[in-house]
Image (spheres, helix red, strand yellow):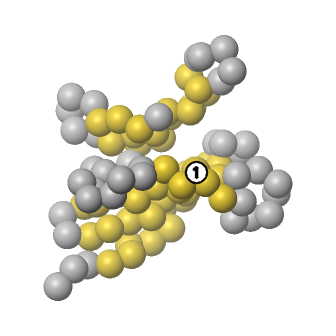
Amino acid sequence: MTYKDPSGISAIQVFDPDGGIYDQWNLPGSFPNDINERLYFGDYNDDLNKEIYVFSQVGDSIFLSCFDKLDGSFRLFKMITVPG
């Protein structure tokens, strides 16, 4: 689940099978307004478990972040683009 809290922090929450929060990751910036799908899934590191990928925006820069739910790690991969 993605959300933006009242203080402006964008975050991803992952829930366990019982509906409790398994983990939460706060993102730099906010979710871009023109992206319909906020979350993407893929097994980048070939460990047979899919990581969670999400784009975020800070000013005019777009970032790609990756979350590995198995080890709880967060990786801010890189700035993708600066328009203009």
Find disc 1 in the rendering and name its residue: 52
Left or right of 21: which side holds 70?
Answer: right
Q: Can residue 28 be seen in the rendering of this structure?
A: no
Q: Position of residue 27 (x, y in %)?
A: 38, 48
Q: Compared with residue 8, is residue 67 higher up or lower down, i.e. above or below?
A: below
Residue drawn at x 59%, y 16% is: 19
Residue drawn at x 56%, y 33% is: 14
**Helix, strand or loop under label 1:** strand
Find residue 22 and report its image quarter.
top right
Q: Compared with residue 62, is residue 1 higher up or lower down, i.e. above or below?
A: above
Residue drawn at x 20%, y 69% is: 60
Q: Compared with residue 68, is residue 9 higher up or lower down, i.e. above or below?
A: above
Q: Compared with residue 20, is residue 44 higher up or lower down, i.e. above or below?
A: below
Instruction: Identify the residue at the far front of this view.
Output: 36
Q: Nearer the viewer, residue 31 or 72?
A: 31
Q: Can residue 25 be seen in the rendering of this structure?
A: yes
Find residue 11 and report its image quarter.
top left
Left or right of 41: which side holds 61?
Answer: left
Q: Position of residue 15 (x, y in %)?
A: 59, 26
Q: Residues within 10 Å of mark 1 (few under 14, many from 20)?
A: some
The amino acid marked with disc number 1 is Ile
Residue drawn at x 66%, y 42% is: 69
Q: Nearer the viewer, residue 11 or 39?
A: 39
Q: How many marks?
A: 1
Q: Quadrant of the image for the C terminus?
A: bottom left
Q: Nearer the viewer, residue 78 or 84?
A: 84
Find residue 48 and report its image quarter.
bottom right
Q: Position of residue 24 (x, y in %)?
A: 50, 34
